[in-house]
Image (spheres, rainbow, N blue to C red):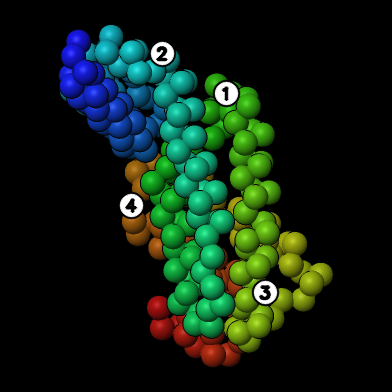
């Protein structure tokens, strides 16, 4: 192998690995982990199954790799600074971006019980994500208070945060179990956003509530 061909081959391998991951996310979102085989993933990624095992020895390893990506996106999302915004749509944009992350990795939430059985350590990592998210969300609420957009009594904050997290993260589970929605669409994401809006509406200022009625 020449010095020139080695980087080119490595580049092709990286592209193939990315294609496998992207293909896997799409299939797992559509069908769920129990209904997707490594053979189906390989076929959809236009490689043979043996080649797939070069990148991921098992389906479990592939799913854990996808969870790593989700985890990285979540940390980056909650660690970014949105500044001292005073407009309601800034905060709605923040919430919409979170819903979009959950949407892109929706099988991780919809099929979480089965995934925990497959990889019990995910329980700790899911809990760590929730813990990591609390401080940025509290800062966001404090910004909204300073902007006179919201007024939440301290005694009610913990319950509101818990309920908002449940809705914002597990709305896909509710739709699947309670409504029989197995194939999620973007309209279902809007449904989830409306549930959050109804949860915080009683605490919004009049101007923020009027704005919310227009979106």
Residue receiving disc 3: 142
The reply to whether discs 4 and 2 touch (Cβ–Cβ < 8 Å) is: no
- Mark positioned earlier in the residue sequence (1 or 3): 1
> Which element carries disc 1, helix, strand or loop?
loop
Residue receiving disc 1: 119
The residue at the point 44 percent across, 63 percent down is 96
> Which element carries disc 4, helix, strand or loop?
loop
Q: Which is closer to the viewer, label 2 or label 1?
A: 2
The residue at the point 38 percent across, 46 percent down is 104
| Image quadrant assignment for residue 57 | top left
The residue at the point 54 percent across, 49 percent down is 75
Residue receiving disc 4: 185
Q: How many residues crowd around disc 1 within 10 Å: few (fewer than 14), some, or many (20 or more)?
A: some
> Which element carries disc 2, helix, strand or loop?
loop
Residue receiving disc 2: 57
Q: Position of residue 184 (x, y in %)?
A: 36, 48
- Mark positioned earlier in the residue sequence (4 or 2): 2
- Mark positioned earlier in the residue sequence (3 or 4): 3
186 relative position to 110: left or right: left
């Amino acid at each position: 192998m020449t010095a020139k061909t080695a980087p080119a081959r490595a580049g092709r391998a990286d592209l193939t690995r990315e294609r496998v991951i992207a293909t896997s996310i799409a299939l797992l979102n559509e069908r769920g982990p129990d209904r997707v085989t490594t053979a189906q993933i390989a076929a959809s990624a236009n490689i043979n199954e043996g080649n797939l095992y070069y990148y991921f020895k098992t389906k479990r390893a592939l799913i854990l790799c996808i969870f790593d990506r989700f985890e990285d996106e979540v940390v980056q999302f909650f660690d970014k600074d949105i500044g001292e915004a005073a407009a309601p749509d800034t905060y709605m944009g923040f919430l919409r971006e979170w819903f979009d992350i959950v949407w892109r990795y929706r099988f991780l939430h919809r099929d979480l019980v089965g995934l925990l059985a497959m990889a019990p350590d995910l329980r700790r990592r899911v809990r760590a994500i929730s813990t990591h998210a609390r401080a940025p969300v509290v800062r966001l609420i404090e910004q909204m208070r300073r902007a006179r957009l919201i007024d939440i009594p301290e005694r009610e904050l913990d319950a509101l945060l818990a309920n908002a997290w449940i809705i914002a993260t597990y709305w896909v589970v509710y739709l699947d179990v309670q409504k029989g929605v197995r194939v999620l669409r973007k309209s279902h994401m809007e449904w989830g956003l409306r549930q959050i809006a109804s949860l915080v509406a009683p605490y919004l200022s009049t101007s923020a509530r009027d704005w919310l009625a227009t979106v």
